[in-house]
Image: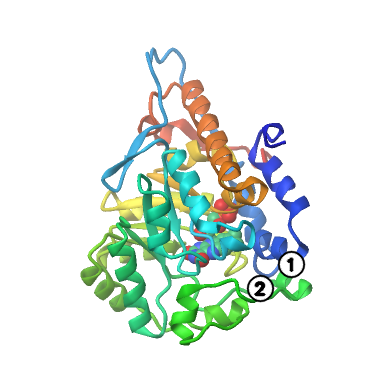
């Protein structure tokens, strides 16, 4: 019974019990020793909240503005590939869930649904598109054009995956993408529909991309570009200087380069480098409303969740994903109230502090 699942970890356990070992390993796993995968979750627990009392707020809400539009909460659905592996409607069901929860979904380049299908399924929803720049520039251009034509609002260009990370769970289970899954971007790049492995799909991505390419993309894309996969202050500043409207502080959920810092530990330096010149999003290991509040207090404009929404989809399709988003929204709302904040924007750096060294609240 979905009603018995009361937090995001419950959904993870329920999804793990349901999915086949290869599919579970693909979605749950990370790169190498999975040190960054684990630390992404643990690192939010190395921050503590500093709530303020007697704030006298007559109302409070998680609502806010992002990229020129309203959202019910500063929590978006991250781009996650191949969603029809866990639900027959895949990204279409995820888009409906995000829309019903009042927030935006980011569709992956490696989606098993087209931008037009997502837009049609959730016409009232807000959609972003995640772009991998393929070596075939014509395919990349066509992907962007489809997103623009389908009313998507921004492009998240993922730059941390010139090749797939070393995902040992997939090697151990012998995971291959099911035949007939249908990945339109991959078929377009290959010029034919045929089964591919995950590393083969990543080999379609241009590994030689540089800042000049990013600048060219930003100037002729027609939509705001956010650079996804930023780990350092240096690259955060370069992204803005090369025309990006913002960044996503992300290590791809620990799936690309293992042994990089958790996003909770690098967010602050990235925020300082952007210095108000663009939007700052962050993802990786967000599992509680308190994690969201900490990210906002450290200067993020919003967060994205990857695996948790996917677990919701795997457990109960659109309804499950919507419930995951609503649980997180309710947790954030309570956290705001108990911190004395009337809105997400009221959280400031003064609402968080580093926890004493031995303290770990999660992970
Ligand atoms: C199974 C899986 C597939 C992913 N596919 C993509 C993708 O196609 N493009 C992309 O930019 N990020 C992809 N990501 C990374 C997510 O967008 C996001 O950065 C990450 O999941 C955040 O960490 P979390 O899962 O702990 O929330 C994927 C993540 C997972 C778990």
Q: Quadrant of ligand 1?
A: bottom right
> Does ligand 1 reach within 8 Å of label 1's beta carbon?
no
Identify the element where label 2 is drawn: loop
| Residue 355, image quadrant | top right
As drawn, the label of residue 77 is none
Residue at image position (59%, 71%) is 181
Q: Is residue 177 above or below residue 81?
A: below
User: Where is mark 2, residue-wise?
Assistant: 178
**Residue nearer the viewer, 335 or 150:** 150
Q: Is residue 78 left or right of residue 116?
A: right
Q: Residues within 10 Å of mark 2 (few under 14, many from 20)?
A: few
Q: Is residue 349 above or below residue 261?
A: above
Camera-side residue: 303 or 8? 8
C-alpha distance separating marks 2 and 1: 10 Å
Q: Secondary structure at mark 1?
A: helix
Q: Residue at x 62, y 37 (%)?
A: 356
Q: Which residue is mark 1?
A: 22
Compared across the picture, whether 81 is left or right of 351 comes to right
């Amino acid at each position: 019974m979905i009603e018995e699942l009361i937090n995001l970890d419950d959904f993870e356990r329920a999804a793990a019990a349901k999915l086949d070992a290869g599919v579970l390993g693909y979605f749950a796993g990370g790169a190498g020793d999975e040190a960054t995968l684990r630390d992404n979750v643990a690192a939010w627990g190395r921050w503590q909240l500093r709530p303020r009392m007697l704030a006298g707020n007559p109302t409070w809400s998680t609502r806010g503005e992002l990229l020129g539009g309203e959202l019910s909460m500063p929590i978006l659905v991250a781009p996650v590939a191949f969603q029809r592996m866990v639900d027959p409607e895949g990204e279409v069901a995820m888009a409906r869930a995000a829309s019903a929860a009042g927030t935006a979904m980011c569709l992956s380049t490696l989606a098993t649904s087209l931008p037009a299908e997502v837009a049609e399924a959730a016409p009232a929803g807000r959609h972003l598109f995640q772009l991998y720049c393929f070596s075939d520039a014509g395919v990349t251009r066509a992907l962007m054009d489809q997103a623009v034509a389908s009313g998507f609002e921004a492009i998240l260009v993922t730059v941390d995956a010139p090749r797939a990370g070393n995902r040992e769970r997939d090697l151990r289970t012998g995971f291959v993408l099911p035949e007939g899954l249908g990945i339109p971007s991959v078929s377009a790049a290959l010029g034919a529909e045929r089964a591919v492995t995950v590393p083969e799909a990543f080999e379609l991505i241009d590994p030689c991309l540089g800042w000049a390419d990013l600048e060219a993309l930003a100037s002729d894309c027609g939509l705001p570009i956010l650079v996804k996969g930023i780990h350092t202050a240096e690259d955060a500043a370069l992204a803005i200087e090369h025309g990006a409207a913002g960044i996503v502080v992300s290590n791809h959920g620990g799936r690309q380069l293992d042994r990089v810092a958790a996003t909770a530990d690098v967010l602050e330096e990235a925020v300082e480098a952007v210095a108000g010149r663009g939007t700052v999003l962050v993802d990786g290991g967000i599992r509680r409303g308190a994690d969201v509040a900490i990210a906002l207090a450290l200067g993020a404009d919003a967060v994205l969740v990857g695996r948790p929404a996917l677990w919701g989809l795997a457990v109960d399709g659109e309804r499950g994903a919507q419930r995951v988003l609503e649980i997180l929204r309710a947790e954030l709302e309570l956290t705001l109230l108990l911190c004395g904040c009337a809105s997400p924007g009221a959280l400031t750096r003064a609402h968080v502090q580093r926890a004493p060294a031995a303290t770990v609240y999660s992970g």
